[in-house]
Amino acid sequence: MAMEFNDLAAFLAVARAGGFRDAARASGVSASGLSVAVRRLEAALDVRLLNRTTRSVAPTEAGQRLIERLTPVLSEMEAALDVLNVFRDTPTGTLKLNVPAGVARAVLPPILAAFLKAYPQIRVDVMVEDNFVDVLSAGCDAGIRYDERLEQDMVAIPIGPRVQRFATAASPEYLDAHGRPTHPRELLAHACLRGQFASGATPLWEFEHDDETVRVDPTGPLRSRPGAAFDLVIQGALSGLGIVHIYEELLLPHIRTGALEPILEPWWQPFSGPFLYYPGRQNLPTPLRAFVDFVKARNASDAG
């Protein structure tokens, strides 16, 4: 049965991305080219692999079976080709990372900028995913998560700040009009701008001060799920819609300019920073090995 390796790779890319456009952005191949490759593969196999609608693309039962068998095979092929990197002066290849939205916005940008400058022949594909996923099954080399959500049997190393905080702020105009809360429970009387998980669950706002922990579930005019959540709630706060409670790193630029005013600062809760985690095998793909070594060297420099 004749079929092209690239057609198999195209099918896997579309299935993982959940659509031709997203797969095209991730792979660098046009959406039309991917569509032709998938149709050619389906014709060669004489079976439908993807169910297509105007809104989404999902694997059929046959397609899911093929994904399960293809993923380890293609990973082994990529690993086989990766051994050629030892003959190059500069590491090359693609590093695929799975990270939550908070890390993608608050932690990863300066690290990736420095890494890509140091390794210009490496491309980094970032999949933003707040749900807990098996990074290998998702087609990624490594993931970044906080310690309570790390996968077992993985190697984990710190990445980014070792301590972060959730910060609370609002525009001076909002606070002048509605008052400045001095205790977290007073937030129940304020307009609060909330983020949600992909599942639709809205996390409580948690505060900590002098061994007292307070969790509140305030209401407000705006809720947003991961992806647009950070930008929308921050812009809402800047526009005077209400109070925002989010990663401190995302609010600091606006606090420094005076556009946002910090509130309840003694109650800002610290939490441990994220970890880079990856399979504990000896022969890591060259791009991942380069990134692991880069992160370790950065950690040592920060500690020094």
Image: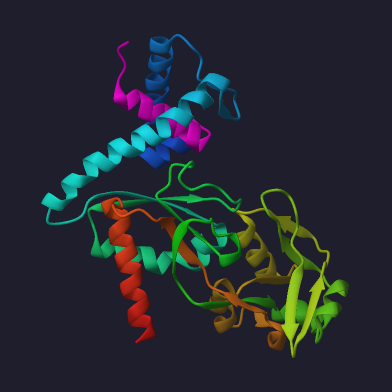
Would residue 18 be visible to someone looking at this image? yes
Residue 55: image x %, image y %? 61, 29
Q: Is residue 18 magenta?
A: yes
Would residue 263 be visible to someone looking at this image? no
213 relative position to 128: left or right: right
167 relative position to 191: left or right: left
Q: Residue at x 55, y 83 (%)?
A: 256
The residue closer to the viewer here, 225 or 297, is 297
Q: Residue at x 11, y 50 (%)?
A: 87
Q: Residue at x 62, y 54 (%)?
A: 226
Residue 224: image x %, image y %? 69, 55
Q: Quadrant of residue 223?
A: bottom right
Where is the C terminus found, in terms of image quarters? bottom left
Q: Is residue 140 magenta?
A: no
Q: Quadrant of residue 221?
A: bottom right
Q: Residue at x 68, y 81 (%)?
A: 268
260 relative position to 66: left or right: right
**Residue 234 drawn above or below residue 73:** below
Q: Which residues are magenta?
A: 1-21
